[in-house]
Image (cartoon, coloured by chain):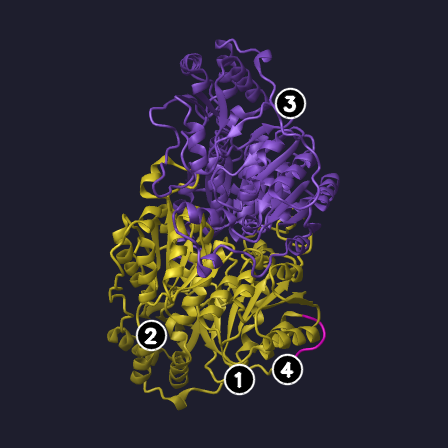
Chain colours: A yellow, B purple
Amino acid sequence: MNGAESLVRTLVAGGVDVCFTNPGTSEMHFVAALDRVEGMRCVLGLFEGVVTGAADGYYRMKGTPASTLLHLGPGLANGLANLHNAKKANSGVVNIVGQHATYHIDYNAPLTSDIEGLARPMSSWVRTSPDAKSVAADGAAAIAAARGAQIATLILPADTAWNDADGVAQVPDENQRAGYSAQAVEQAAKLIRNGGASTLLLITGGALTEHGLDLAGRIAGKTGCKVMTPTSNPRMARGRGRFSVDRIPYVVDQAIPILKEFKNIVLIEAGEPVAFFAYPNKPSLLKPEGCEVHRMTSGSENSVAALEALAGALQAKAADRQPQKLVELAKPTGALTHASIAQAIATAIPENAIVVDESVTTGRAFFPPTAAAAPHDWLQNMGGSIGFSTPVATGAAIACPDRKVICMVGDGSAMYTLQSLWTQAREGLNVVTIVFANRIYQILRGEFDHVGAGAPGQRAQDMLKLDRPTLDFVAMAKGMGVPARAVDNADDFNKALAEAVAEPGPRLIEVQM
Amino acid sequence: MNGAESLVRTLVAGGVDVCFTNPGTSEMHFVAALDRVEGMRCVLGLFEGVVTGAADGYYRMKGTPASTLLHLGPGLANGLANLHNAKKANSGVVNIVGQHATYHIDYNAPLTSDIEGLARPMSSWVRTSPDAKSVAADGAAAIAAARGAQIATLILPADTAWNDADGVAQVPDENQRAGYSAQAVEQAAKLIRNGGASTLLLITGGALTEHGLDLAGRIAGKTGCKVMTPTSNPRMARGRGRFSVDRIPYVVDQAIPILKEFKNIVLIEAGEPVAFFAYPNKPSLLKPEGCEVHRMTSGSENSVAALEALAGALQAKAADRQPQKLVELAKPTGALTHASIAQAIATAIPENAIVVDESVTTGRAFFPPTAAAAPHDWLQNMGGSIGFSTPVATGAAIACPDRKVICMVGDGSAMYTLQSLWTQAREGLNVVTIVFANRIYQILRGEFDHVGAGAPGQRAQDMLKLDRPTLDFVAMAKGMGVPARAVDNADDFNKALAEAVAEPGPRLIEVQM
């Protein structure tokens, strides 16, 4: 057994049985090993940003890591932006990055680069295997790191792949999700008891399961405290019957008045609320002056168990959860507006769907109506690097073949990693991609104002607008094997959504606004 | 004047008057400054790999750097692969990368990352401006570095863009291309005189102008020494009337027998010949044992002047250059084969064209016939990171609006940075993209053998083949505003090429093999 085979066998034995790949020469022995090892599902992407984003989506839905196979420094570089997003989402990923043979690196052949240097900014764990006999153990250590919600990057010189190895390695049993601090829960209980409505429970991460949210709902009902989430969350259980929570608005001028009322913030995995960007004469920290912040759990702790304990300490029971007033749903008719688009989507989301949200400005009003939609999971971009959604939708669909994935994306964002569509077609994935074609980086038009840059003239507008030439997403989707249609009114959008949700395999809808 | 405006004015004053952009919030003040400053041409790309590759192509044709505008760490990350290629081509680029405001970085907002850490592996010059008053001088230093054929990355915290600056800075007058070492030339002359046919002149970089090649041709004619180039070269003058030079083959088993005859290699900007990849039981160094290597010029020296001196020392005159036997050109008919494709392209290349070559396996036979084509420049991938050609063609067309660009690319490679087509349509660039659709990463099929991985089984083949589903490049091109057609025989290919070359603006031809 050579090093590559010892790694593939170690991955499969360690439960990492999906590999998103865009291989090159240095990775050919890994590819060859696939023929000899049962149980590894390989999914080819045409661009590395698809590969790494898919691994993020897979982890968010499955809770266990997938692997990626990338070609030397530049292949890793192409995948870094979505590894950044994955890292900020606390997703675990095992990256296998090929490298020149150990003895070839010094010759500075064209593809030579500082792979470890490239890996470090977006990885928590980086290692280069020194020889074939180390590859299996290094792979097992990478799996352990990824199980612990880290981006692990294992660099594999070609000779470590083709030389003889000893065999399979077992994954060390570390990095288990810890419990929680009883003291931190007790302190939170005290703050909530004393603070009531002036206390904010800011929750994210593992707390946003149906049960975690229900516990938060009970606590809010019992004590009067408020529950919110950050602007973006890796995954949130939403829809009818679930406790619906508002997010802190992206726009600083909207966030500050909402947070003004709080004297205490209890953090459950969340960070302290900060502005996404800095703006001249606006604060970076969004909490009011004098507001105290208390951390109850971090991302490595068991937040649902901590919420159980907190509900217990506060004697909050199921009956304490107050009924919420939800937006009424009706299929919209007439023109496509942000509101009618939101209604159309809310009525179309099927039971148990996975919604991947990169709708940017078009989607700012999607949250209230979709709270009344059929139960679903909602995935957001945690790192702010666009080109996130179509790969994440691809990986989520691989993780959950029995669930429908609804991928909502702005036209600007869609163009970064549109190659995802080909992988979706190839694998027959149940992904409905909805592209909001407003023909502009609309968020930047807003940010132009927010940073105090004045009114954009012709040359500045040229850097924001996407209308020359018009992008035809229907043609591009068909070019990659995905059936697609464009709609320009609510009735057609309803129909297109219903069709796309009903049919198996990928579909794309271009929403012309 | 704020920091952003001081930078834009410094760039324009320093002759950096083209900016390839994919901006975000942190770069809005730079974008706003474009309205106030005359003379900066901004070219929008839908993906950062387009932006950085275009800057590479621009430098190769213009000889002076363009700038790029990129959005924080992930925006830079998306551009790194083509910066890698640019770095290996000794292209100068001024990257402007936005960063959070200095005081906002510590809050770890979603887009926060180690930008300097990301920049370093693919940049020779990296600096973060500490305040608005430093931005102009830092920009001028970046220009100086880029003029010296370096990748310069200037990181601009948002507050350094919006705070008050002092004004424009002048570019320090450094990094001029040096002369050459008379001693190294003398030594080369001695080796060539003594060695004759057993001496190889291995030339690349600045030596590959029409005149530089002519000088090499005279020297070869006079002394019997052989002239070759590395497998890949940043830019080479080629076609009728020019001295045609063979390249060292990519395939190790083809390169070794060719180099076996040499006792001395004189390097003119080239590196010592090494294999692109290492393979089991094959050498990394391609020269025969005992072969001596002598460096005559490096990339920072004036190789044409050195060749003049060398020709002088060897008394090689214009009349010494021997006539070369060139392949006869005729428009092919019948089936599309590698040979007929090569003939079709060689007959279609228009006078003074720029050929960007990422044709990979399909193009291995293109060199001999195109030596007889109309005079043109030939640009190749120096870093081996695929997704190189369509961006480089875009930048070359911006640099040389009066020349036709022929971009030849494999289907696998085309899918990395296909967004280039939209920029070509938007700017009305004279680029003919020819996609060789063989529906496979054919080079990997070959490498699978070369690394001794045996015969690929079904699962391995699945990682190499692109035939499921079939990519429709005509549809994708139309989706981005570029007229396109597919051809499956030589006669149609001839016609499509003639039409595409005759018409202004971008065109795409899918060659179905």
Q: For numbered disc 3, what is the local secondary structure?
A: loop
Q: Residues within 10 Å of mark 1 (few under 14, many from 20)?
A: few
Whether the magenta-drawn stretch holds residue A331 is answered as yes
At label 3, the amino acid type is Gly
Q: Is residue B54 left or right of residue A385?
A: right
Q: Are marks 1 and 3 on the same chain?
A: no
The image quarter containing residue A39 is: bottom left
At label 2, the amino acid type is Ser
Which of discs 4 and 1 lies nearer the camera? The answer is 4
Q: Nearer the viewer, residue B165 or A61?
A: A61
Per the rendering, the mark at residue A325 is 1
Q: Residues within 10 Å of mark 2 (few under 14, many from 20)?
A: many
Q: How many marks?
A: 4
Give the chain of mark 4. Answer: A
Q: Which contiguous range is marked in magenta?
A: A330-336
Which of discs 3 and 2 lies nearer the camera? The answer is 3
Q: What separation in Å lies between label 1 and label 3 (alpha carbons)?
A: 81 Å
Q: What separation in Å lies between label 1 and label 2 (alpha carbons)?
A: 26 Å
Q: Nearer the viewer, residue B314 or A237?
A: B314
Question: Disc 4 or 1, which lies upstream in sequence?
Answer: 1
Q: Where residue B323 sits in the image (x, y, percent)?
A: 61, 19
Q: For numbered disc 1, what is the local secondary structure?
A: loop
Per the rendering, the mark at residue B241 is 3
Give the chain of mark 2. Answer: A
Whether the magenta-drawn stretch holds residue B361 is answered as no
Which of discs 4 and 3 lies nearer the camera? The answer is 3
**Disc 4 marks which residue?**
A330
The residue depicted at 52 percent of the width and 58 percent of the height is: A387
